[in-house]
Amino acid sequence: MIDYQDFDDHQLMHRVTLEDKGALEAIYTRYGSSVYSLAMYMLKQEALAEEATQDIFLNIWLKASSYRTDRGEPRAWIMSVAHHKIVDVIRSRRRTLAVTDPDGYETLELLPSAQISTEEEVERKIERERILKAVATLPPPQRKVIMMAYFEGYSQSEMSELLNQPLGTVKTRVRLAMQKLRLVIEGDVHD
Amino acid sequence: MFTTDPHNEQHPEEQLGAYALDILDQAEAIQVESHLLACYRCRDTVAHMQASTAIIGESVDHLEPPAALQSRIMNSLPRIGLDATVPAHASSLVGSTGRIGKVLMPLAAVLVLALLSYNVYVNSVLSSQVESLQRESAVLTRWGKLAAQESQVMDHLDELRAASNFLAETASTDVILESPTNNGNSGGILLVADDGRRAMLMVTGMRELEPPSSYEVWLVRPDRSEWAGQLKVDSKGWGAVELYPPQSLFDFDMVRLTPAPASDPVPGRGDMILEGQIVDHRIAR
């Protein structure tokens, strides 16, 4: 009997490429809640969120072999696959979904993070709060485009229209904001 | 906009953030993606940016999914059959690589010399094949083919690109793997980067194992063995994997490939175990 709790994320991902369903179940146990929560937050409807979560784990099952260790941690890859799928749903249903007021992102308050259960969770919480703090310290126009892009799936040209700003300005804001977040995650920005 | 570095390489630095957020137009995204296939530096940048955005995604209020969702997902999983999902052109490419290996493995020393001598040529040929398949893959995607098909093609493309990169590194060390019992036509080659912290293992003539069994790569020295990775062999007996050992491969005496779980191998079957002596030639160079 294989105890999947003993495997780290990299080992689980590799076992998924070997069609080990137990490994995918273990990944679901670890990240199913994060994926579903993001789907609910962005799609705002239970049925859509469930359907998206199912598609996301199907994608993980089918595409696990395309994951490469030099492209980051499995957790980031899984959330990236999830985000990509959810944005696809949003874009295809743009007209029927309730859209968050973009102005709300200028005064974004940090959202509560998950319950802490393990040492790894503690480390993740510290990292998460570091990033969220960085997001919160972004100038409001930069924060707005990051949040609109991430949570609403707007392209740069769509944001340009919605915000009534030149496309070049939107691109600059995205670039500066992402550079700052990158610096934070690399530890170059200290509290 | 692409920027140029001192090595005269162009990098789409201004687009990487938007790429990580998945908000580029399709044409721009394809342009960046094709650059990423060949550029470790930009891949690293995107990986860091995606890690940042993933954390944003995890910051939302946590909700527990419905209990039935897990079983619904698990019951909906299709089997990922390699032969069923890889297009004919990709299979033939992988298959031809395996046949080349079968012929050349007994002449291992000659193979190593040939690889080193012709590495640039092989690299250019493989790169050309990779680019060609990449274009075909983009067409397949546009035609709405199954996601599995795309990922399997990309998987083989990545294997080929990784192999070609190693072949282009004149400072790599080669370790030949053979069956300890000299049974069958199995064999392999381990290409080790000069720092010993990165390697590419390619095997051929191996027996395909039923999932979840797989081959495991072990680094061996007198006091201990260390697990270095897992390898999946396809129905043609071909498999390849990149290894990133926690310490230099040159600190070990031998590399060994064994089936896992350990109870699985049939005694005496040489096509399920490979071994190779790691010899550090770097001082000689």
Image (spheres, rainbow, N blue to C red):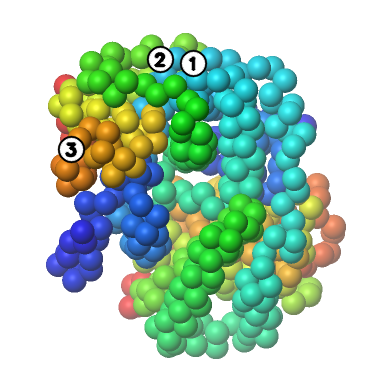
Mark 1 and 2 residues: CB-CB less than 8 Å, in contact? yes
Q: Are marks 1 and 3 on the same chain?
A: no
Spatial separation of the CA atoms under disc 1 and disc 2: 7 Å
B158 relative to B128, above or below:
above
Q: Are marks 1 and 2 on the same chain?
A: no
A132 sits to left or right of B80 = left
Chain letter of disc 2 in the image = A
In the picture shown, does residue A100 fall above or below A67? above
Question: What residue is shown with label 2?
Answer: A113
Q: Residue furthest front?
A: A95
- Residue in the image at 17% along x and 38% along y: A165
- Residue A63, horizontal then vertical, whole percent: 59, 49
Residue ID at (38%, 44%) = B22
* SS at mark 2 in the image: loop
The numbered mark at residue A165 is: 3
The kind of residue on which mark 1 rests is His
Quarter of the picture holding the N terminus of chain A: top right
The percent position of residue A173, horizontal first and vertical second, equals 18, 38
